[in-house]
Amino acid sequence: MYFLSGWPKRLLCPLGSPAEAPFHVQSDPQRAFFAVLAAARLSIWYSRPSVLIVTYKEPAKSSTQFGSYKQAEWRPDSTMIAVSTANGYILFFHITSTRGDKYLYEPVYPKGSPQMKGTPHFKEEQCAPALNLEMRKILDLQAPIMSLQSVLEDLLVATSDGLLHLIHWEGMTNGRKAINLCTVPFSVDLQSSRVGSFLGFTDVHIRDMEYCATLDGFAVVFNDGKVGFITPVSSRFTAEQLHGVWPQDVVDGTCVAVNNKYRLMAFGCVSGSVQVYTIDNSTGAMLLSHKLELTAKQYPDIWNKTGAVKLMRWSPDNSVVIVTWEYGGLSLWSVFGAQLICTLGGDFAYRSDGTKKDPLKINSMSWGAEGYHLWVISGFGSQNTEIESDLRSVVKQPSILLFQFIKSVLTVNPCMSNQEQVLLQGEDRLYLNCGEASQTQNPRSSSTHSEHKPSREKSPFADGGLESQGLSTLLGHRHWHVVQISSTYLESNWPIRFSAIDKLGQNIAVVGKFGFAHYSLLTKKWKLFGNITQEQNMIVTGGLAWWNDFMVLACYNINDRQEELRVYLRTSNLDNAFAHVTKAQAETLLLSVFQDMVIVFRADCSICLYSIERKSDGPNTTAGIQVLQEVSMSRYIPHPFLVVSVTLTSVSTENGITLKMPQQARGAESIMLNLAGQLIMMQRDRSGPQIREKDSNPNNQRKLLPFCPPVVLAQSVENVWTTCRANKQKRHLLEALWLSCGGAGMKVWLPLFPRDHRKPHSFLSQRIMLPFHINIYPLAVLFEDALVLGAVNDTLLYDSLYTRNNAREQLEVLFPFCVVERTSQIYLHHILRQLLVRNLGEQALLLAQSCATLPYFPHVLELMLHEVLEEEATSREPIPDPLLPTVAKFITEFPLFLQTVVHCARKTEYALWNYLFAAVGNPKDLFEECLMAQDLDTAASYLIILQNMEVPAVSRQHATLLFNTALEQGKWDLCRHMIRFLKAIGSGESETPPSTPTAQEPSSSGGFEFFRNRSISLSQSAENVPASKFSLQKTLSMPSGPSGKRWSKDSDCAENMYIDMMLWRHARRLLEDVRLKDLGCFAAQLGFELISWLCKERTRAARVDNFVIALKRLHKDFLWPLPIIPASSISSPFKNGKYRTVGEQLLKSQSADPFLNLEMDAGISNIQRSQSWLSNIGPTHHEIDTASSHGPQMQDAFLSPLSNKGDECSIGSATDLTESSSMVDGDWTMVDENFSTLSLTQSELEHISMELASKGPHKSQVQLRYLLHIFMEAGCLDWCIVIGLILRESSIINQILVITQSSEVDGEMLQNIKTGLHAVDRWASTDCPGYKPFLNIIKPQLQKLSEITEEQVQPDAFQPITMGKTPEQTSPRAEESRGSSSHGSIPQGEVGSSNMVSRKEEDTAQAEEEEPFQDGTYDCSVS
């Protein structure tokens, strides 16, 4: 509503000493001038600019006679000031202008400036007028004066002798006697007539009073703390005609402030609270409306230590009241008690170092024009604080503080309530939350806010503004779109009185003192009147509203002295020639637009409805307005000023009216009128036969139905929101009426629809009023999105920039910097809860289902469950009818039930869990439901619940179920959590995050170190290995870093073995199902020590039972195409081996992998290794490895010119197959060397391209090579054969032959390999002839294999070539014995390339090799 902005300004008083510091400020009725009192000095200040105009200083002699000045009061026409003094005198000062057209300050412009052209009223607005103060009359009342109050043309004075004086402004009593309060009867209401009792004691007098014009009386506070309201029974103001009413329960009143618009009397009390009363229309009694008081919850350390209420002031628009206390502090409240600002907490009360500030003490305050400023004369806390006394010693001049405010447009232009934007207006700028929406339409926009714009798929302007702007537009960010009001318009029209924004959020119009101006958010330009005289000739009286591209406003024509209704087109020039003008019968106070209708409320208490339509007959497009209907409200409205807002709505009590065509925009069914906070509805009267005339009347001259008598819907209403949009899916929200009720929160008048359009029961209500509380002050409602938008003050401290020595009373030290931030709140859970409380579960279900698509709907259910649980579970008294079971049953209707319950439980303290699960069900059952629904993450949350509520055995059982399921589904993050969870259950320790592996230097093991470092096998301890072993070179199988020893301290624990058993069981299942890709993901993600486990399972699970099935499954899992034979391959020279060397050399650059071959002797130098590798190219046939499966692209690269780098070329490996180091990028240099003497025919190129096309994805190739390396180390030669077949590389077969020749190999395994290869050969002959060429190539190797098989090597003599001990002892440390002299018999031609890759190449290869099973298109892991 109202929000503080920035720092307060300081106005230094240029005259006087600190002893004559000002203590009282009072604005004139127009709030253009301010009277400031010191002990013997009266000063007049101007508001804009804020400068001192004139000062009257009382001479010393008369000052002694009169006493010090106490209070000032302005005459309604601002020509006189009455000042009361301590000795009972009233001094009447006349304010006169100095001779001639003189001003205190005049701006000087250069010649030719447009301001020199003589703008009407220019000097009056820009320059402070020169005034004189002259004392004309002195009146002695012979008693100290307690209160002054201007009442129409008289001055009402209360003195300490218990008298009320009614004095004329000329200083005469006109013969009227003073009224003795003891003769005025008081009663609890006016029905008692003259029977009321008298005050009954002699020393009673009025301490404070204020006149209320709309109640025709004045509220008073007596010196004994009692409060009351005195009103004349007739027009005569005599003791015989006065009667007073008072509430019985107020005995500690201190001050009073009256709200004329809402007919409220706010009484400040000694307790620090404010009690707000209103007058009962029927009995005349004073009824308590609400209280304004700080709560212990919000302000625990100060709520009851504020002292008595010292001052209260209602804002000029009567929408907020500001309250100060005796011990300091300032608070701002809306008219019905919503707290907006309080300076007793937060950055106002504490410095940045945490020390407490002294609260600001306020001696006097007064609102400025339109409530943009609050003039404050402060007392700056207690006198003994060090910093305050330091400040006073530095600053000699007294000062006035100006607090700056921005406010919602709803305070002055309530027709904006049918919008979904938040618009705030300040003294010279506007804040809106929809600027980014309009910018999305403008390609030229380069606003600084553009980086905050959310992208929207659909334009917010696509459908005439009839659809919701949506969350992304209205909630995109917390920043405002700030529009600076045109300085040209402000110069002569300050202050801004009204503003409005159109439905699309593209255009804004503002109204100042005269005329108006409008601004386009698309073009970033203001449009003003071209003719200044036209602008200065109109005063907008009843606000303004947008209708499509037109601005509709009610104004007063000064020249013609005529009330008018005008319509201006936005796109045309701002000129009366393009306006449509309709004369009005009386002054228009309020204006609103609904669809194609305009509704106005006039000063004669009548409502007039107009139709508005677009006319484009001539060259200029205009809008035509015609009167449709007039409704007199004088019977119901005691004073026209009491009407806060009036609007047409489509809301009615009969929902059946809108049942027929729910998708169409609904018509005007009723008038909503806010009468001093009382919401009144007048519906169309459909009881008569006039319905037919609506359609039968020609020429679109609609004769509208009359209205029924008014019905009161709600009390204490500040704002009303409704929409005419229709949405069949969200009828509850769109056809509801939303009310803001101040401190009571919000209310919604919700329609109740029968399910499936059944006929409603006649005895059931079709609407229900539901109250609910929200934590923000509502400024707009997003109907479809079930959100309330608002704003909130935030503060920033800058006092740390100053020290005590240089502060010099800086405002940055005394006050924080105030900013306004956007905020929003969900209200749906409140409505659902209220419906359930009233046993309207079916309506709640319909409403919830209509909102189930909202992104925060799960949060809505969780909020509802949480709030009900907190209230009922913590209640000290038993609840006869608990709501929690109903809420639990309601939530089960939605698929998010399981998540909602567990999220609520996780955010609730443990003590409430039993109460919660007694209502929603056993957590074990809910856990099993999650498993059945495959919702593992939610099941994991339930596991934490079970751990706290059940014995460890139950937790372990359920954790095992979840762990196994997570393993099956590849939920690796969950698996890691479950391992830690199971570990914690077994050891009784709390959950601890896994330790982070230490960074390692790159080594010959390349990218595979990543997987070794994350090993979490629990049964194998690394502590048994001597420390000296770790100084060896880190190679493939050695777990290095702390992760290898993560669980070593509990290596013998049964828990570790239990977890390992589950991991082994899962790995065995994967291997038996030939799910090698899943096995690789499993090992990589969980750090499973695959090699050591494979060594154990070599003759069991790791044995290939069916080579053909394994081959097929790997082709499928790795997206690897089956080889095919091209038609031209019969005569291909490649098949016959003519150019075999070339093909092999092409492949060798990619397939000579250090992980596929064993390390050579440590003594051979790098040069010798490279030479030996080159010298051994030839005996085998390789195929071309590509970086991707896109054959045509590779063919283009193959035909491109090649550079000749000689022996400097890089020989790659499987780890080199990255995007940056593939064959395309330069590994083809060897092709150029060997092809220099060859010429390829067309058939040969076709064969090469066919070979390229038969390769799988590059990522699959990396993964296969990684698995090949793993199986080779573990000695699973049959799996190596299968992978070698898929890759179609004869070098793998050669390696296996080397292993079988140099070691004693299990004969059973060799026999299995032989049998499997024969099966593959048969399958290739019948089903897959593409494999035949490769099988033919490796026939010599197969024959050697057969020979070795026949020798029947004993199985138990087998040891893997890289192991020096038994696999069980050394499998994690297999590399420690590598490179020893026992392996010298390995042919260098087969393995010499392992150390040829340079360190640089290893680093490059590691980038992609580190995570071959982590992510990508073909990855099975869950990132």
Image (cartoon, rainbow, N blue to C red):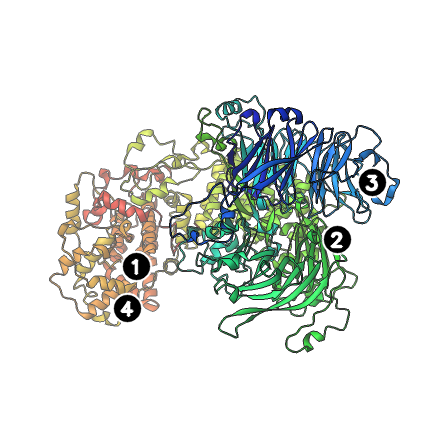
In front of the other: 1341 or 809? 809
Under mark 2, the amino acid is Pro
Q: Quadrant of residue 1339?
A: bottom left
Which circle, 3 or 2, is nearer the viewer? 2
Which residue was labeled with disc 4? Answer: 1125
Circle 4 residues within 10 Å: few <14, some 14–19, many ≥20: some
Task: Kindly indicate whether the residue at mark 1 contacts the one at mark 2 (C-beta within 8 angstroms).
Answer: no
Q: CA distance from mark 3 to mark 2?
A: 22 Å
Picture coordinates of residue 349, whole percent (x, y): 56, 31
Task: Kindly indicate whether the residue at mark 2 contacts the one at mark 3 (C-beta within 8 angstroms).
Answer: no
Under mark 4, the amino acid is Ile
Q: Decide which of tag 2 and tag 1 comes sooner along the chain.
A: 2
**Under tag 2, what secondary structure?**
loop
Which circle, 2 or 1, is nearer the viewer? 2
Picture coordinates of residue 650, whole percent (x, y): 66, 63
Numbered mark located on residue 638 in the image: 2
**Under tag 4, what secondary structure?**
loop
Picture coordinates of residue 178, whole percent (x, y): 78, 36
Tell me: 812 left or right of 370.
left
Circle 2 residues within 10 Å: few <14, some 14–19, many ≥20: some
Please, is residue 332 above or below residue 730 in the view?
Answer: above
Under mark 3, the amino acid is Val
Numbered mark located on residue 871 in the image: none
Residue shown at 86% from the left, 44% from the top: 193
Which residue was labeled with disc 3? Answer: 188
Which residue was labeled with disc 1? Answer: 1188
Under mark 1, the amino acid is Ser
Q: Decide which of tag 1 and tag 4 comes sooner along the chain.
A: 4
Which circle, 1 or 4, is nearer the viewer? 1
Picture coordinates of residue 1149, whole percent (x, y): 21, 53
Which circle, 3 or 4, is nearer the viewer? 3
